[in-house]
Image (cartoon, rainbow, N blue to C red):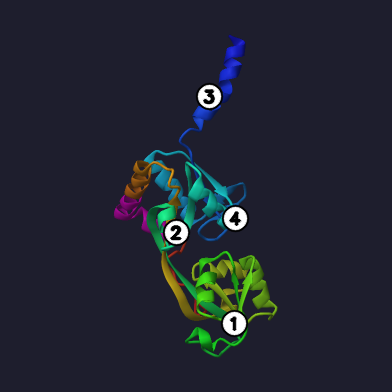
Amino acid sequence: MKWMLQALLPLLSLAAHAGELRMLTDNHPPLHFQQGEHMAGFAVDVVQALAQRSGDPVQIQQRPMLRALRDASEEADTAVFTILRTAERETRYQWVGPLMQTETALYSGSNDTTPVTDLQQTQGQIAVPRKWLVYSFLRQQGLTNLWGVDSPEIMMRLLQVGRVQYVVADTMSVGTFAAEQGMRLEQLRYQIPLMHQDAYIAFSPKVDPAQVARWQQALEAMERDGSLQRLKQRWKIDRPRTSTD
């Protein structure tokens, strides 16, 4: 009997994790970021609240975004957040949202007093992470002064040392990106908006559609009872973050 129990233990362990959703995300404060041993942020709080309401166990894991998007398009019981919903991605995932709306904008250093009303007026290099959707958007504009970098940390450092004249970031995260490089938000000058898009959770096509529908219903319930708005207020998601703050 002892050997039989030992043989069954791995199976019991697997059964305990059956149905657990892997929720993949990257480092993008204040939406999701590592805090000690755990992930924190607005979208992390939303995902945990939705999991509790739907009764689905989840495991939140940090991954590079491109890898997370690939895994969520191919693997069972997997989702990725927080993702912009585009025509190219539409059929590759099942969607729950929107969680929030994002504004991505062009920023310069605060010493740059020349206003920009059009991208073609930019004088100097524009740094932006290549993995971000806005990078593809800017490439489509035919810009010759676009500098693709590996991370927002590198982007902000290039602005700080004067290697580039502009950076691109969403208005809720730009202050955090600046602070991580020892800069104050007042050292940045908001120039022009570039994109306004809704952000979602993207589920693998291999996830049961009934489970995805359950999450969508839970999100709509959070909207009705005000709990989603309270999380936005807690994380200052609706507050514009410009150089005039």
Give the extent of the magenta segment. 219-234
Quarter of the figure with the N terminus: top right
Helix, strand or loop for disc 1: loop
- Which residue is labeled 3 in the image? 12
Badge 1 amino acid: Thr
For marks 3 and 4, the one nearer the N-term is 3
For marks 3 and 1, the one nearer the N-term is 3
Q: Which mark is residue 64?
A: 4
> Which residue corresponds to the image point at 61% horizontal and 11% vertical from the top-left?
2
Query: CA–CA distance between discs 3 and 1?
Result: 58 Å
Query: CA–CA distance between discs 2 and 3?
Result: 37 Å
Do callouts 3 and 1 mark residues in contact (Cβ within 8 Å)? no
Helix, strand or loop for disc 3: helix
Q: Which mark is residue 89?
A: 2
Do callouts 1 and 2 mark residues in contact (Cβ within 8 Å)? no
Residue 134, given in percent of the width and then of the height, sits at 51, 70
